[in-house]
Amino acid sequence: MWIDSFGKKIAYYLELMATLPNSRPDAEFAGVIHFDGGKKNIVTGITSYEVSDGSRAVYGTSREFELTIKLATGEDVHIRVALKFCSRCGAEFELGETKNYCNQCGSKQ
């Protein structure tokens, strides 16, 4: 069952990750960015966010975009974007690519 307040909580974390309010680099550690409400840490293909309320979010390098948010209350939220392929030749489209033809075979999608 969908609960609006829970959806708003997820949106809050996604907004923090997208905007990094008042972001500033860490003085000692490369790859660490502090922002109002937490910090972002980038280490060899893994990006993680630690939020001041105890929640964490992680995503890594893979062909498909997958994000896991571990809420301070214990729930896990998983977001996965599946790849899109050309219906004619099977060529793979880039994530978020919104065009109506294939670069490989030229077919309309």
Image (cartoon, grey):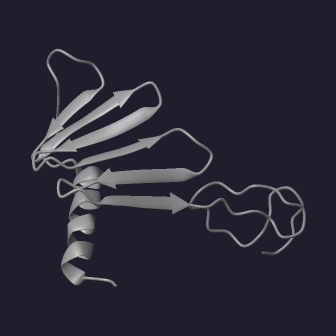
How many numbered callouts?
A: 0
On screen, 41 above or below 57?
above
Front-most of 55 and 12?
55
On screen, 84 above or below 60?
below
Residue 60 in the figure: left or right of residue 2: right
Q: Quadrant of the C terminus?
A: bottom right
Q: Quadrant of the N terminus?
A: bottom left
Q: Residue, x 62% and y 68% (percent of image)?
A: 98
Residue at far top of view: 28
Q: Position of residue 79 (x, y in %)?
A: 45, 60
Q: Residue, x 27% and y 42% (percent of image)?
A: 49
Q: Residue, x 80% and y 65% (percent of image)?
A: 86
Residue 31 in the figure: left or right of residue 22: right
Q: Position of residue 23 (x, y in %)?
A: 17, 40
Front-most of 96 and 72?
72
Residue at far front of view: 74
Q: Position of residue 7 (x, y in %)?
A: 27, 74
Q: Position of residue 78 (x, y in %)?
A: 42, 59
Q: Residue, x 23% and y 73% (percent of image)?
A: 6
On screen, 23 above or below 103?
above
On screen, 85 above or below 28?
below
Residue 61 in the figure: left or right of residue 53: right
